[in-house]
């Protein structure tokens, strides 16, 4: 019998780059203990044997995949409709959807039959589910005659059901959810359609109306809109989700909603006119793959917000985007749907936001500061999950400034179904892994063909494609260890085959004669980046390169703010990093922008643009015994970091590390309580450097 763990293990094996992989690496990728992994391998082997496949071999901490298993096992097993054992979390998702789409109260007996569990199990799951839904302002109500239904604000109810439909982490659960929806739609429409027939027809209808919208939906967004249409069809009449809204009716998506609902009548799925505004808001909030700039010009508030956000991020991060027009164009792909999602409380799946915040915390913090600076002007609050995706847009342009032309190393095509933001998350990881010597391009699944392989050095896809090639590598949105290794090996091998440079394998053999290499793949990648010219380009100064012990000082003088800025620049002036005029540049910028760089209350990161007064990159810290009064802006500053940089990029890694350390309460307390002794200042300096070493490891 299948369960979520065995399906996940099958999906992992289907992406493996080689026949053998260490158990430790699998545990890291799947985030599970060795004992759990061994148990799941044993269960999966039983299933493989029952379906006529060779089984997985284990020995000496190594997993060996038999020939042909990674390609065909998952499809063959899932298509055979095997029995599936639900986890507790999966049962709660199914109960939520079942109750949310049913036209009558759902009884305990029907849930017992659907999930193949006891009455006590159902009652326990319902009790837990009530608490979960209540947090979303949705209520799981019991009826006196037996059965459950969902109550609450209709938008919140629909959002809760859609959220459950988006949560399944494996293909089998997605199939089960869609079968439930298909059954409910068939019952109401009096039809007998297969799941694939219904959702295929709905996707076709949605795509046919894209010409009327502000852009082209991502493949996953098309599926999500199809879910919404089914929920609207099944729940309409309970209460209207969105009343008639003059603004919505003027949007291009309103015309698209009219076309979609009109064509759904051929499926015997008639939707009331009162639901048009709601469907239009769903479409405006859906993730886009491409944006129609014509519609952006009709919504000046969004264009102005994008420009303010770009300008503020540049000020906070001390960078200058070389191609603001292109960045704004890509940013609007996310900003416009985000704006309408927030305005009309439309739920979409943000499955990667937590990963982005965790892995790119420093970049997220900078983006959060920029957003918080401008959002009051526009009267709405941007939640953390939306800021995470904005961070990926900014990070991609800060780290990588590839042109539309193919680079000398070639172009890599990233294929994704979840929208531009998710594709940029993959691109960010590829740039870090393979360097900036390539041109990285993004394409939606719908526009990919086998012929495109001839135009690219490599195709990296996060979604299954209907063809195979040695130039095609499948990845997750967050690359696993085996996927990273496969990408590196492909890059090393194919660059060596096509270039006049030395063979990297020969270089590895030479090094191996004189030293023990513990990470051959990593060393090979360093050689590759050096030989293709991207090694120096990809290097960036660390905090320890630019922040020195002698730059940390204490001042017991009570100074007005301009004097304090000049005093804070003194360590860098004395060491030749900047000239005297740099302090005046900072003061002029503050006169213009105010406390633009108070990243944390009481801590200022003072900086100006690169210019004639900057000789090299440096960061200094001056802590004042008494906070400096910035009366013009009603601010009190205890500590001033001064940052100087020679260009828009050299300082960025150091700045990110500085931000990451300052996010910790302990160092902020050390700065606040500093007494001016050399021992105290040394402890503060050592804390930053030691933390950077931990981050690097």
Image (cartoon, rainbow, N blue to C red):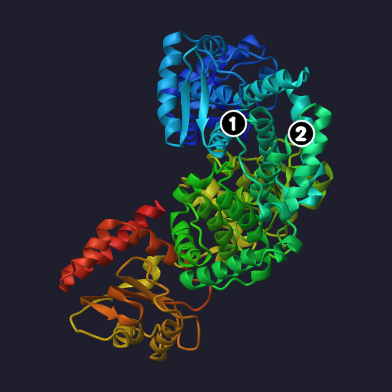
- Which residue is at the front of the view, 448 or 460? 448
- Which residue is at the front of the view, 446 or 483? 446
Q: Is residue 331 above or below residue 283?
A: below
Q: Is residue 354 left or right of residue 682?
A: right
Q: Which mark is residue 202?
A: 2
Task: Name the residue tied to disc 1.
Answer: 165
**Element class at badge 1:** helix
- Which residue is at the front of the view, 575 or 669? 669
Whole-angstrom CA distance, mark 1 to mark 2, is: 16 Å
Q: Badge 2: how crowded within 10 Å, few (<14), some, or many (20+)?
A: many
**Element class at badge 2:** helix
Q: Is residue 205 above or below residue 6?
A: below
Q: Badge 1: how crowded within 10 Å, few (<14), some, or many (20+)?
A: many
Please report the residue visible at 37 percent of the width from the left and 66 percent of the height from the top: 544
From this viewpoint, is residue 124 visible? yes
Q: Is residue 8 above or below residue 45?
A: below
């Amino acid at each position: 019998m299948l369960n979520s763990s065995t399906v996940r293990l099958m999906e992992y094996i289907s992406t493996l780059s080689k026949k053998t992989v260490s158990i430790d690496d699998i545990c890291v990728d799947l985030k599970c203990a060795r004992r759990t992994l061994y148990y799941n391998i044993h269960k999966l082997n039983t299933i493989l044997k029952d379906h006529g496949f060779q089984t997985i071999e284990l020995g000496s901490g190594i997993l060996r995949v038999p020939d042909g298993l990674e390609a065909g096992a998952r499809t063959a097993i899932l298509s055979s409709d095997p029995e599936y054992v639900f986890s507790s979390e999966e049962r709660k998702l199914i109960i939520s959807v079942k109750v949310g789409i049913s036209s009558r109260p759902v009884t305990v007996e029907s849930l017992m039959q659907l999930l193949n569990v006891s009455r006590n199990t159902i009652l326990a799951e319902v009790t837990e589910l009530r608490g979960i839904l209540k947090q979303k302002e949705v209520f799981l109500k019991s009826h006196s005659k037996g059965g459950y239904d969902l109550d609450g604000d209709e938008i919140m109810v629909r959002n809760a059901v859609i959220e459950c439909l988006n949560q399944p982490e494996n293909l089998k659960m997605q199939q089960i959810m869609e079968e439930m929806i298909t059954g409910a739609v068939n019952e109401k429409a009096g039809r007998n359609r297969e799941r694939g027939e219904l959702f295929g027809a709905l996707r076709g209808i949605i795509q046919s109306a894209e010409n009327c919208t502000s852009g082209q939906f991502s493949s996953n967004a098309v599926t999500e809109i199809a879910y919404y249409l089914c929920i609207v069809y099944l729940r309409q009449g309970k209460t209207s989700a969105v009343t008639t809204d003059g603004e919505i009716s003027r949007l291009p998506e309103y015309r698209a909603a009219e076309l979609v609902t009109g064509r759904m009548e051929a499926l015997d799925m008639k939707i009331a006119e009162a639901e048009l505004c709601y469907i239009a808001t769903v479409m405006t909030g859906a993730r886009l793959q491409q944006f129609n700039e014509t519609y952006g010009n009709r919504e000046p508030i969004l264009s102005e917000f994008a420009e303010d956000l770009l300008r503020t991020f540049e000020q906070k991060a001390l960078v200058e985007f070389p191609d603001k027009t292109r960045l704004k164009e890509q940013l609007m792909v996310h900003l416009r749907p985000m704006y309408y999602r927030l305005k009309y409380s439309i739920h979409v799946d943000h499955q990667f936001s937590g990963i982005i915040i965790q892995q790119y915390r420093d970049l997220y913090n900078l983006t959060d500061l920029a957003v918080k600076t401008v959002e009051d002007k526009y009267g709405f609050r941007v939640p953390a999950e939306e800021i995470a995706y904005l961070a990926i847009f900014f990070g991609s342009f800060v780290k990588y400034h590839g042109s539309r032309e193919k680079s000398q190393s070639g172009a890599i095509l990233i294929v994704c179904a979840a929208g531009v933001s998710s594709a940029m998350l993959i691109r960010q990881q590829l740039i870090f892994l393979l360097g900036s010597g390539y041109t990285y391009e993004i394409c939606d699944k719908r526009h990919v063909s086998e012929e495109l392989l001839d135009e690219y050095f490599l195709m990296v896809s996060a979604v299954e494609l209907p063809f195979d090639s040695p130039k095609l590598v499948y990845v997750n949105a967050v690359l696993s260890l085996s996927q990273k290794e496969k990408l590196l090996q492909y890059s090393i091998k194919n660059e060596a085959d096509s270039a006049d440079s030395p063979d990297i394998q020969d270089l590895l053999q030479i090094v191996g004669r004189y030293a023990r290499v513990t990470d051959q793949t990593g060393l090979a990648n360093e050689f590759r980046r050096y030989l293709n010219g991207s090694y120096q380009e990809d290097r960036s100064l660390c905090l320890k390169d630019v922040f020195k012990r002698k730059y940390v000082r204490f001042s017991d003088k009570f100074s007005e703010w301009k004097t304090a800025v000049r005093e804070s620049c003194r360590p860098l002036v004395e060491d030749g990093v900047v000239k005297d005029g740099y302090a005046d540049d900072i003061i002029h910028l503050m006169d213009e922008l105010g406390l633009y760089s108070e990243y944390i209350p009481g801590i200022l990161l003072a900086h100006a643009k690169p210019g004639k007064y900057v000789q090299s990159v440096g960061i200094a810290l001056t802590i004042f015994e008494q906070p400096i009064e910035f009366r013009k802006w009603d601010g009190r500053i205890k500590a001033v970091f001064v940052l100087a940089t020679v260009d828009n990029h050299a300082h960025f890694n150091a700045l990110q590390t500085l931000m990451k350390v300052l996010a910790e309460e302990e160092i902020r307390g050390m700065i606040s309580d500093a007494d001016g002794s050399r021992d105290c200042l040394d402890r503060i300096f050592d804390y930053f450097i030691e933390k950077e070493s931990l981050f690097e490891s």
